[in-house]
Image (cartoon, grey):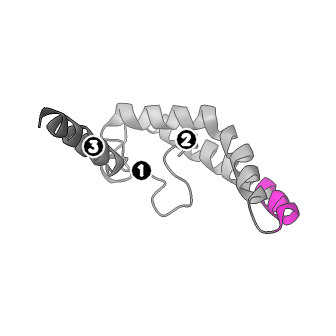
Amino acid sequence: MYRMLVSGFAIASVMGCLHTVAWAQDPIHKAGRGLTNVLTCWIELPKQIHMGSQESNPVTGLAWGLVKGIGLTGLRGGVGLYEAVTFPIPYPKDYASPYDGMELTDYAWE
């Protein structure tokens, strides 16, 4: 009984973490997300090239992944810089993620 209770609690905790919405609740989180994205924006390039290579035609997928990776690297770096500079300002509303509605996630490795 004890093992089932502990296992159930562990599973519920993990599942609860998987369904949380990512947002910056305050200026410190916004600044951290911005600086992290400025420093790790380069991850988009190999990530998109790898994802392109998984397409049905790897040659065109690699080419499109390279183009897309360059664009998303610039976008992530630019938005990260914007967030790092404007971290005291609660915009978007209540420090929400500026990546909502974009193809990007809050961090490059997600």
User: x%, y% of residue 20?
Assistant: 31, 49
Left or right: 27 as drawn, with respect to 67 = left
Q: Between marks 2 and 3, how big is the CA–CA gap?
A: 34 Å
Which disc, if any, is residue 80? 2
Residue drawn where x is 46% and y is 53% of the image: 98
Pointer 2 or 1: first along the chain:
2
Pointer 1 or 3: first along the chain:
3
Residue pushed farthest right? 59
Residue drawn where x is 52% and y is 43% of the image: 107
Name the amino acid type tagged 3. Answer: Ile
Name the amino acid type tagged 1. Answer: Ser
Q: Is residue 61 magenta?
A: yes
Which image quarter is the N terminus in? top left
Note whether residue 85 is visible.
no
Residue stretch rendered in magenta on the structure: 57-66
User: x%, y% of residue 63?
Assistant: 85, 59
Pointer 2 or 3: first along the chain:
3
Left or right: 44 as drawn, with respect to 98 = right
Residue neighbourhood size for the residue with mark 2, other residues' Cα within 10 Å, grouped as few (<14), some (14–19), many (≥20)? many
